[in-house]
Image (tube, helix red, strand yellow):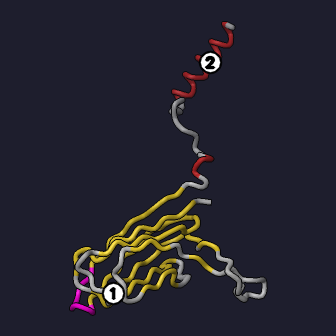
Amino acid sequence: MKRYAIAVIILAVLLALLGVACDQPPLYEPQAAGKVSSATVTVATTGNAGAALGSSTFGPIGPGWLDAVYFDFDASITTTTDITLSYYSPSWGDIITMTNSATDTLYYPRLAPHATTGIAFTDDAVVPWLVDGTLKLNVTQSTSATVAVTATVYWTRP
């Protein structure tokens, strides 16, 4: 028992000398898989009423699966507002395109999966978007505002 106690003390001293704290969490956290993360941006718009525009980028975000996007519009924003959330880097296309709306909304964007031939399935099957990069939020045909819209994206790590 005495040798065991001495070995533990020597090990603790060696770890302390190497700069390893015994109360630190492990470098790999298995509970991080499946964890929901989020990022929020605001978009300021400038220009004439009905023609004001602005943009902002998220990122980089991911890797993971895009779960939801929440848009919170300022009360002064008109219903002529168009919103596009797209991949900015890499450039993989539009995720959400919303026209003539300024209603606070929670979206669950999904894709139709494709067969091995590259043709999208025609049934109701959907899969979440893969996110691993930078997203861009464009606002057009809006009203000039310091904060026209606040957007939050939520994704789950694989």
Amino acid type at image mark 1: Thr
What x and y, as percent, mark residue 6? 63, 12
Instruction: Kindly identify which residue carries mark 2.
Output: 8
Quarter occupied by residue 145: bottom left
Q: Residue at x 58, y 64 (%)?
A: 64
Tag 2's secondary structure?
A: helix
Q: Position of residue 110 (x, y in %)?
A: 58, 76
- 10 Å neighbourhood of mark 1: few (<14), some, or many (≥20)? many
Q: Is residue 10 above or below residue 43?
A: above
Which residue is pictured at 53% across the width and 84% down the height? 93
Does the magenta run of residues contain 87? Answer: no
Amino acid type, residue under disc 2 in the picture: Val
Residue 111: name its quadrant.
bottom right
Residue positioned 58% across, 17% down in the render: 9
**Quadrant placement of the N terminus:** top right
Query: For residue 103, what is the image quadrant?
Result: bottom left
- Residue 61's place in the image compared with 83, above or below, is above
The spot of residue 91 in percent (x, y) is 53, 82
Magenta-drawn stretch, dominant element (helix, strand or loop) = loop
Q: Which residues are magenta?
A: 45-51
| Sequence-wise first label, 1 or 2 | 2
Foreground residue among 54 and 152: 152
Q: Which mark is residue 81?
A: 1
At horizontal 44% and vertical 71% (from top left) the residue drawn is 106
Residue closer to the observer: 75 or 45: 75
Q: Residue furthest top?
A: 2
Mark 2 neighbour density, 10 Å: few (under 14) some (14–19) many (20 or more): few
